[in-house]
Each structure stands twice: as C-alpha cells, then as structure tokens.
Image (spheres, grey):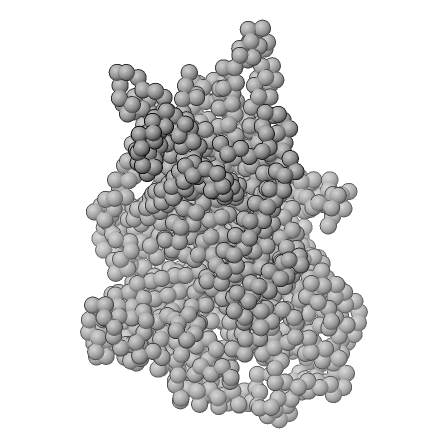
C-alpha cells in the first residue's frame, strides 16, 4: 500500500514513463525489474503446491539444500557437498555462516524441521511427500545431515533439490500466513517477500546480506499475465522488462526488434504421442468400413510406421516456427540418462506405407486422435498436423481436442474400469528432475500403483526387459553406471516404440535491451539469472 | 448484444391501410431506410455464401487429407501446395482461410439460427402457457423469467458451458438457456393483450379448443415483437459463441467457427500475420452488423410509437 | 414494501440454490479437479493422498452434503488451488472489478449521452446518421476483438498508454482504488473503454429515443414557444426527462458490465474477479466457481432491488407490488 502523499510524485513519474521515447530508452527506474510470468501461482508457501510457478518463485526466497543450474545439473546450495556413505545412506554437509532474512543463523535443525513440514501441509493440492517419503533424516551435528533409506536411493540429492528450506521457527506457520508474509524470519534466498497479491503480482526486495553476494535489483515484480498476446504486448508497450514463455509466433518479430533481446535454450519438455497398448480392441480405432478390428497399435510394425509417417522437421518448421527440436527420446541429448544412439525417426512416407502393408494393413484403418487445448505450445495445431500426416499414410484420421480439465481426466481414467479412455493421445512431459529416470518411470514402466511405477503411463505400455533395466538403474547409486543403465532402458523403450516422441520445446524469454536473461531448461524465470548488460 | 436494448413494449403492427397488404406496407416502410436494405442484402449474400460453401470453397478445411501443414501461415494471394491460390492466406495449420471462413460462417450461422429457433420455440411456449394458465403457474414462470433476465447472459453461458463441456450441442443448449426468457416475457405480454380482445373471446364463446385459439389467434398476433427479438438475439448468439470460443470454453478447434478462427489467429496478431485473425474478424463483424441493421429497422417499422 | 423486499430475497435464494446444484454437479461431469492440481510427476499414492486431503475421494453426493452442511454454517469452502477461503479470494478481487465497471459506466454516459442527444435532436443530419451507424457497429464488435486492437493501437504502436495491469492502489475508508493517481487512470483507460463500448452504443440509443420523444412533448414545445434558448431546453427539460430511464437501465446494466469484465480482464491482465473465475473454470476449482456464482447473484439481486426502490422513489406511479399483468 502506498502513502497518499507520494501520489503526486508517482503521477509525475508515470507521466514521464508514458512517453514512448522514454519507454524505449528504458527509463523504468534502472534498479527495478518487472517480469511477466505466464502462470498464476497458488501460494507463497514453498511447500503447499508442487507446481512450476510456485517452485520457481519460492526459489528466490527459500533455497533448497541442493540447487539446479540452468541445465538442471545439481550444484551445491545450502548443502556445500554430499556423498553416498553406502547404498542406503547419504550425508550432506551444510553451508556455514548462512543467515535467514532476519539474521537467524541457518543450521541442521532448520533442515529437520523442513523435512517434517514439507510432506504434511494441510489441504495441499499436490504435496512434496514423494520426495521425502521413505527417507529418515538425522542430525549428526549442526552442519551435517544424514539421510537413510530402506532401499538404494541414488536420487536423494535430486529429490532434495525440489523444495526450499524454511526456518525451524516457521514450521507451524500456515499457508495463509505464508501468503501474508507472516514468516518474518524469511528464507536464506537472495530475495525477500515484500508483497503478494494473489492472481496479480509478487514483489520481492533483495536480501542485503545474501551469502552469495548482492543482487543488482532494488525491487523485482513478478506480474502474472496468463494471456500470451497480452504478455507480448506488455513487453512491447514497455510495461514490463522481461517475459517468459514467448509464443512461437512472436519470436521472429521480437528477435528483429532492436530494442529487445531474446534468449532461448532447449527445454526438458518433450511432446509425444501415447498409444493404446493394452486393449485387444481399442475404442477409437475401427476398420475402414467402420467394423471393429483388433488393436493395430499392438503391432510393432504399425507403431514404427506411424512414427515414420510423422514429418518432425515439418512440425518444427511450420508449426513451431523453428522454436523446437525434433525428438528421438524422452529428453534432449546431453541430459543425464539419455542415449547417444537414439536419433529422431526420419520421415519416410513410402517406408511407412510398406511397414503398414507388411503388418497386414495395406489399406490402413480409421483412428481418432485426442489432445488437450492450451496446455502445450501449439498443441492443437500439432495434433492436426500429425492427423494430416497419418491421412497421407492411408489412415483415416479424425481429431478431437478437449479442454485440459476434461482431457486429462478422461485420458487417465475415463474408460471402463477407470482405465485410460483414448487410443492415441498427444501429451507432453517435462523432466523436473533434469534426468531421465523420472520420465521412464512415469511414462513407460509397467503400470503398478503400489510400486509407484507407470503413474502416467496412459498407454499402459508394458515390457519386461524395459522394466528390468529400469529397476536396475534405479538401484544403482554410482552415477556413471546409472547413466548407462538409464540410456539402455531408454533404447529398449524407444526401439519398441512404447511411445512416439515428436519434438522438444525451446524455452524462450524476451527482454528489454540491456537486460540479459539466462535461459533455463526447466522453464524457470529466476531474477537471480537476470542481469544488466 | 445487450439485454436492455430490446424494447419491452413492442406493440402489434399498426392497423393496415386499405390499398396495401400489410406485408407490402411493411416492406415499403422497411426499405425506406437504405442502410437497412443494405443490411438485408448483405445478410442474404452471407447466408448464400455459407450455404454454398462446399461448392465454392477451394478446399474442404475439415478434411485433414487436403490440408497440408507445409502451407501454414501463407500470406494472402500465395499459392498452396495443391496449386490453388489462397486469396485470404492460410492459418497456422495450413488451412485456406477463405475456405475456413466460408465453412466457419456455416457453423456460426447454424449455432445462431438453431439457438434462436429453439429459444424462440421454448420461450414462446412458456410465455403462452404463462399467459393462458394465469394464477400461480404464471407467477412462478414469470419470476423465473425475471431472474434469468437479471443475470448477464455471458456469465450464465460461461458457467453453463463450464458445467456442460465443449461442443456445438452444448453451446446451443447454453445459448438457448440464456435466450428463452426474452421470448417468454414478450410473448406473454402480447398474449395478455390479445387475450382480452374481442376476437379471442368470440373464438372461445364459439367453443373452439384452447390449442386452436392459441395457435390460430393469439400466436400470429405476437409474431411481430418475436421477429425483432429473433434478429437481435441471433446476432447476440453469434457474438456470444465467438466470445466463449475466445475464452477457450466454446467450440472445438478442429471444425472452427468464426470465433475459433479469430481466437486461433489472435496469437499471430503481434507478429504481423494479421490475416489469420483479421479476415475471420471482418466476416464475423459483417454478419453481426447485417443482422443488427435488419433488426434495428424491423424494430422501428414494427414499433408505431416512434412514427410521427 | 417489506414484503416486496423479502420476496425478492427469497427468489434470490432460489436462483442461488439452482445455480449451485448445476455448478456443483456440472463441474464434476467435466472432469476430476485432481488432474488439474497435481504436479504431473506425482505417482498414484500421492494422487490418492491429495484426493483424500481435499475430500475428492468421496462420492459426489456426499461432497455435496458436506458442502451444504458447511454452507449453512457460513463456510463456502476453500479453493482447491489456493487453499484459502473461496469467498475471501473473490471479495479480495472484487474492488478491482467494480472500479473497472464504474469507470466504464461513466465513460458510457460521458461519451454516449452527448452523441445520443445530438442524434435525437437532429435526426436527419448526416452526423446523426453516422452516429447511429457507429452505434450499430458498437453493438456488433465482439469485446475481445476490440480489446486487442486497443492494445495494439494505443499501447504497442503509439505507446500512449500501458497495455496491462492496474495502477498503484491507495486505500481510502477501507476501499482500495487506483483512481487517485495519474498512473492509475492511465492503466484503467483502455480496459474501461473496451468494456464501455457496448454501453456507449446503448446510451446513444436511449438518449436518442428519449430526446426524440421529449422533443414532441407539449412542455418542450411550450418552452420553445416561450422562446427559451435551445441549450436551456436541452439542458433542463429534455435532459431531465431522459435521465431517469438512462440511469435506470444503466443501473441494471452494471451487472452485465461486471460479467463482461471476464473478457476484458483476461485481455488486459486486470486483477479482478472475472479473471479469477476464468482461472477457476480452467482449473476446475469448484469452490471458487460456486462462491463466485453466489457473490454475483447476490450482487445482481441487490442492484435490481436498489434500482427498483430508487425508481419508485423517483416515479410515484410505479408501485412495488408485482401485478400479474
């Protein structure tokens, strides 16, 4: 809230700002940074809701033990180092001399308190319990923590990079009080929470005593602008300095604007098609004459033909306007646990037709594709383009797109007996952990709720060789060996066409000239990665 | 577009003059306004274009085999891979915009017409029941009508569509739900006036059935105000459908109405590919303006109060 | 009088109940909110945990009964997404929306009234015809389309006004407003104009019709005969006569301004309750949708009631009993 006496001055400044020339020159108080983000966050409580916008914002205020750099490689943060003592024990050495915003020193007690709070926030719509579950935390001394697990758990450091550490004093603070800024001890991060207006903005001020050094911004405002054209317009009009999630259609124009700069990098998000592997007769596949036929997707040759019929470069070029990269596996090359052998399947319509004929479908069949709207970049257009390509293969293809809310319910449990309803769907997957085990576990492992495997396997793909390889990888604590095992599992899944990846998105930011954004694979927009040039 | 623009007291047509049939008199009076004549002409052309879409469109925009992604975002006048010229350019998936607009018009007009006809039938039936039944039934019906009219249509439609889901049928249901009350109120009002008139009393004293009285005598005399409402509400429905589609709760993307085309082209506005959104926008605007011009004139012609 | 007010309130309760049932069960048919809430990486165990925490694991009728029980005690539930009281979230966002709607309303009068008067007093002139043609255009242009055009023109190309958001707010007597600073007005100008567009057309038509009728009235003719100046005739006699219907209609239209702000707020990133509703619809945040419906119905019923009461005070001929014909 502002004092009334300030208004006159504010108004004058605003009048100056409104002049176009001044805006172009970027007068907006040199120290202030205004960022337009594409999603609304749901709370300022770092443990309330495990979703990207919340985690991204919390990262400024409450730091996790382990950090992820712009390529999602793990790096020391509140933990200076960590090592596996044996297959089921990890030890974390904490950074010394770190203080919370109000000066309270950070110690192992805060970590223990956080581990108690994070999985147990009441009414959490998506909690962090999966990252804490099955781990026993103990304090060795003020700056050493040990984590015991029942089975080998190579991903403990990754798990602990997902949520921030709060001071022990705030362990009973409610979500509402976090929103109101009542955890006055604050976090250890580079910024302090100054204002939160739900659905509108978050204002941060720098932590003058940050252990990692001083930030260049005197104030950072995150504005939530969900409509993409509006976000771009706000940048062009000089309302804000940085926008994330630039629509593919505007990238070229923004790149050509001398007053703006654009930063981008490949994303950890893959767009892919999942297909019905588990039904003998699939509900949205029919013979050319409309009769019921045996599910052709259970035939490897059909799956290969479909993958081959997709012209990935065309999708990248014509739909994504080059803001994407053709995909051959679940994570871009170079990420941990990816295969060097897997390349995007080359477009070969004649080859695909031949395979389809060999599989016993020389005349094709009828199939309906399903996909969400406004969930992934250009989702509807991609699915329409793929439908066009399948039509040319001789498969009579229809498309139905649904609002996300409806789509994901039906795609996950809409069929008889709460099984996935559709035959062939477009979906996307972002690897929040920055390595492939997560993706493989969720998308390709045999559906097995008690074990937490195949949770998002909406095609119910199941392959024993794949499962065995993946399980081996998940038990392997040694990084090099695990990397190899994951890559092998990936090869098994991809060569068997368990799903059909099409492309990796590019994450793109645009900013006023003079403001440089560090592009990140995890789609996070961090003020700590934005610098003056 | 707005509820309050409707005259609440549209009266019956003036008593006919001797030398002209009522229709001729009406037509003459209607065409006195050149703007309205233009509107009617435009509307007829638009409807004909929409009806003839499969014959005149260069491409069937819903047939995925004939749409090629390689043709996407071509500017107006470029030639598509299949050899025909895309006079209005193409959209983000390579659909010829001229074809898309012609087919989109069909969907928009169909949604408008269907919801208009259905709402008129439902509303008139309910209004007549109210007027004819009287007493408690009438009271309850009219209270529901009042309430319905006090809630803004865009909001009711938005919430209904959110609850019903996407699809042409659902949009039509939602539009009928927000429109019927106008008809019910108007028809009831006119019917009450008609009922007291001598011919109805005469008809009843002759022992004619209720249904016959309603359909042969009361209904025809309520038609004038209903016609005005149909035009205004059809325009409103088309615009509302476009708005809902823009908000992402309207029609499915794969067989786009004008609203969906505009919404899809929206993301290209800032990048200079204006045609994807502007041309469908102009088509929508012309459609609505033509209907409104007609409706506006109809209101003046059928409402004797303002005649000097 | 009291009976009238009470009856209106009873009716309002009836609408609220009906809308509630539709929304509550309708949202459930569209999809399971759980898939809109959880992070995609979550496994089945966590999905089940979340469903339990939010009470979504129970059958829908049981959820409804629990909701009713709490509602009777004044608790409309907590937002699935934000975890806060749904009603509080809405009330928090309401001032921004009301502010926008009020500014739009005044714009409508300020622009529409003079144009409409002119068109009514000089019905045959070329300018009047132009005004009427424009007013038809105003009815026909879809709000969302005009919104982006306004941003493109005034914010992006000309750079005169900001494209998005609300200016700094100041709290006066407990009401937050951004209208006390120049910056606030700059921010509100475009969205309010966008929202006002339809109402400008409406006011033009009402004013024109009113002026045309009033010009034919005996007292105006009499005033003219008496030699009163044109401006006095317009200012005093005609204006006074047409203000009552305009104010009445606009009062009723205020509700539709609030409703249409859903569109405007989305385009202009205005932090009002319309955006909250849209966000809630896309995320299936049922408690917020339900609470929004209740708040809005209460708001409209209140406005209608006030308009009726004021109208009856202004015009004693109107009786507040609801005659059947």
Residue A495 position in % (x across, y down)? 35, 82
Q: Would residue C87 be seen by someone viewing this image from the given angle? A: yes
Q: Would residue C276 be seen by someone viewing this image from the given angle? A: no
Q: Which residue is pictured at 31% across the width and 20% down the height?
A: B16
Q: Which residue is pictured at 30% across the width and 76% down the height?
A: A281
The residue closer to the viewer here, C6 or A278, is C6
Residue B278 position in % (x across, y down)? 39, 44
Q: Which residue is pictured at 45% across the width and 41% down the height?
A: B181
Residue C116 position in % (x across, y down)? 51, 25
Q: Which residue is pictured at 38% across the width and 49% down the height?
A: B172
Location of residue A96 with respect to C307 vertically, above or below: below
In the figure, is residue C94 to the left or right of C25?
A: right
Location of residue A14 with respect to C69 vertically, above or below: above
The residue closer to the viewer here, A289 or A270, is A289
Residue B228 position in % (x across, y down)? 38, 32
- Where does the N terminus of chain C fall, quadrant-wise? top right
Location of residue B258 with respect to A297 vertically, above or below: above
């Amino acid at each position: 809230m502002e004092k009334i006496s300030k208004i006159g001055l504010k108004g004058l400044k605003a009048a100056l700002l409104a002049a176009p020339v001044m805006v172009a020159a970027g007068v907006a108080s040199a120290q202030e940074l205004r960022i337009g983000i594409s999603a609304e966050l749901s709370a300022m409580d770092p443990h309330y809701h495990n979703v990207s916008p919340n985690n991204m914002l919390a990262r400024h205020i409450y730091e996790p033990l382990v950090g992820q750099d712009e390529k999602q490689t793990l790096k020391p943060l509140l933990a200076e180092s960590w090592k596996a003592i044996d297959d089921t024990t990890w030890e974390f050495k904490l950074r010394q001399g770190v203080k919370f915003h109000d000066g309270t020193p950070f110690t192992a007690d805060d970590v223990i308190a956080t581990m108690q709070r994070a999985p147990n926030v009441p009414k959490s719509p998506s909690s962090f319990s999966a990252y804490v579950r099955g781990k026993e935390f103990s304090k060795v001394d003020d700056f050493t923590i040990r984590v015991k697990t029942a089975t080998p758990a190579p991903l403990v450091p990754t798990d602990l990079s997902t949520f921030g550490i709060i001071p022990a004093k705030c362990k009973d603070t409610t979500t509402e009080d976090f929103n109101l800024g009542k955890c006055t001890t604050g976090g250890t991060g580079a910024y302090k929470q100054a204002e939160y207006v739900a659905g509108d903005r978050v204002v941060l001020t720098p932590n003058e005593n940050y252990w990692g050094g001083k930030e260049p911004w005197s104030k950072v405002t995150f504005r939530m602008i969900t409509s993409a054209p509006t976000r771009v317009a706000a940048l062009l009009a000089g309302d804000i300095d940085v926008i994330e999630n630039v629509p593919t259609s505007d990238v070229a124009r923004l790149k050509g604007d001398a007053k703006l700069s654009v930063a981008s990098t490949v994303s950890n998000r893959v767009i892919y098609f999942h297909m019905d592997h588990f039904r003998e007769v699939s509900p949205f596949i029919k013979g050319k004459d409309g009769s019921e036929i045996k599910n052709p997707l259970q035939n490897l040759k059909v799956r290969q033909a479909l993958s081959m019929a997709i012209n990935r470069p065309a999708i990248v070029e014509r739909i994504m306007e080059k803001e994407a990269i053709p995909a051959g596996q679940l994570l871009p090359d170079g990420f941990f646990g990816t295969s060097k052998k897997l390349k995007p399947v080359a477009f070969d319509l004649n080859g695909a037709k031949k395979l389809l004929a060999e599989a016993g479908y020389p005349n094709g069949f009828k199939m309906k594709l399903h996909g969400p709207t406004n969930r992934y970049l250009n989702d509807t257009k991609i699915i329409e383009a793929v439908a066009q390509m399948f039509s040319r293969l001789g498969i009579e293809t229809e498309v139905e797109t649904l609002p996300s809310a409806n789509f994901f319910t039906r795609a996950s449990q809409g069929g008889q007996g709460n099984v996935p309803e559709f035959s062939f769907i477009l979906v996307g997957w972002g690897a929040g952990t920055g390595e492939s085990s997560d993706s493989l576990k969720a998308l390709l492992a045999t559906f097995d709720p008690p074990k937490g495997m195949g949770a998002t396997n909406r095609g119910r793909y199941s392959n024993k060789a794949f499962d065995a390889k993946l399980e081996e990888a998940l038990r392997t604590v040694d990084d090099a060996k695990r990397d190899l095992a994951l890559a092998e599992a990936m090869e098994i899944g991809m060569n068997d066409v368990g799903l059909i990846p099409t492309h990796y998105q590019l994450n793109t930011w645009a900013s006023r000239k003079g403001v440089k954004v560090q592009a990140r694979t995890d789609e996070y927009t961090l003020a700590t990665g934005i610098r003056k040039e | 577009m707005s509820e309050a623009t409707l005259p609440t007291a549209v009266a019956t047509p003036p008593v006919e003059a001797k030398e002209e049939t009522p229709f001729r008199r009406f037509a003459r009076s209607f065409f006195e306004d050149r703007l309205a004549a233009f509107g009617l002409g435009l509307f007829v052309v638009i409807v004909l274009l929409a009806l003839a879409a499969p014959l005149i469109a260069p491409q069937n925009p819903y047939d995925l085999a004939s749409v090629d992604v390689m043709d996407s975002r071509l500017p107006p006048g470029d030639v598509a891979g299949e050899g025909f010229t895309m006079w209005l350019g193409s959209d983000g998936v390579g659909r010829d915009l001229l074809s898309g607009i012609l087919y989109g018009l069909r969907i928009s007009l169909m949604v408008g017409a269907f919801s208009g006809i259905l709402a008129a039938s439902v509303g008139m039936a309910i209004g007549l029941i109210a007027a004819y039944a009287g007493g408690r039934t009438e009271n309850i019906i009219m209270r529901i009508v009042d309430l319905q009219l006090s809630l803004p249509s865009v909001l009711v439609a938005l919430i209904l569509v959110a609850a019903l889901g996407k699809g042409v049928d659902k949009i039509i249901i939602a539009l009928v739900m927000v429109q019927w009350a106008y008809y019910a109120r108007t028809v009831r009002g006119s019917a009450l006036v008609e009922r007291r008139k001598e011919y109805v009393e005469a008809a009843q004293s002759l022992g004619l059935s209720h249904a016959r009285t309603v359909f042969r005598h009361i209904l025809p005399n309520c038609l004038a105000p209903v016609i005005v409402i149909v035009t205004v509400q059809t325009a409103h429905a088309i615009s509302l459908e476009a708005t809902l589609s823009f908000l992402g709760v309207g029609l499915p993307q794969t067989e786009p109405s004008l609203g969906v085309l505009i919404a899809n082209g929206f993301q290209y506005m800032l990048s200079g590919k204006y045609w994807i959104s502007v041309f469908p926008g102009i088509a929508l605007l012309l459609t609505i303006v033509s209907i409104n011009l007609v409706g506006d004139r109809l209101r003046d012609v059928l409402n004797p109060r303002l005649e000097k | 009088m009291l009976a009238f007010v009470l009856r209106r309130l009873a009716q309002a309760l009836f609408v609220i109940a009906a809308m509630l049932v539709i929304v509550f069960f309708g949202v459930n048919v569209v999809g399971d909110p759980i898939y809109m809430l959880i992070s995609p990486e979550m496994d089945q165990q966590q999905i089940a945990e979340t469903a339990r925490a939010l009470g979504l694991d129970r059958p829908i009728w049981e959820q409804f009964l629990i909701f009713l029980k709490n509602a009777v005690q004044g608790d409309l539930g907590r937002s699935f997404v934000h975890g806060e009281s749904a009603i509080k979230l809405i009330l928090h966002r309401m001032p921004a929306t009301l502010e926008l709607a009020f500014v739009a309303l005044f714009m409508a009068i300020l622009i529409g009234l003079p144009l409409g008067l002119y068109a009514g007093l000089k019905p045959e002139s070329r300018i009047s015809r132009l005004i009427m043609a424009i007013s038809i255009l105003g009815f026909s242009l879809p709000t969302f389309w005009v919104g982006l055009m306004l941003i493109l023109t005034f914010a992006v190309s000309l750079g005169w006004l900001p494209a998005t958001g609300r200016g700094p707010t100041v709290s006066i007597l407990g009401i937050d407003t951004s209208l006390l600073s120049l910056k606030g007005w700059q921010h509100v100008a475009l969205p309010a104009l966008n929202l006002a567009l339809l109402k400008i057309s409406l006011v033009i038509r009402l004013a024109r019709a009113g002026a045309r009728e009033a010009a034919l009235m005996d007292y105006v003719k009499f005033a003219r005969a008496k030699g009163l100046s044109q401006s006095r005739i317009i200012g005093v006699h005609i204006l006074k006569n047409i203000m009552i219907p305009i104010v009445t209609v606009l009062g009723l239209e205020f509700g539709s301004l609030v409703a249409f702000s859903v569109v405007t707020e989305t385009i202009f990133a205005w932090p009002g309750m319309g955006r909250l509703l849209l966000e809630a619809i896309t995320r299936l945040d049922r408690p917020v949708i339900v609470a929004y419906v209740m708040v809005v119905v209460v708001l409209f019923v209140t406005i209608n009631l006030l308009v009726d009461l004021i109208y009856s005070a202004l015009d004693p001929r109107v009786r507040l009993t609801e005659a059947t014909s």
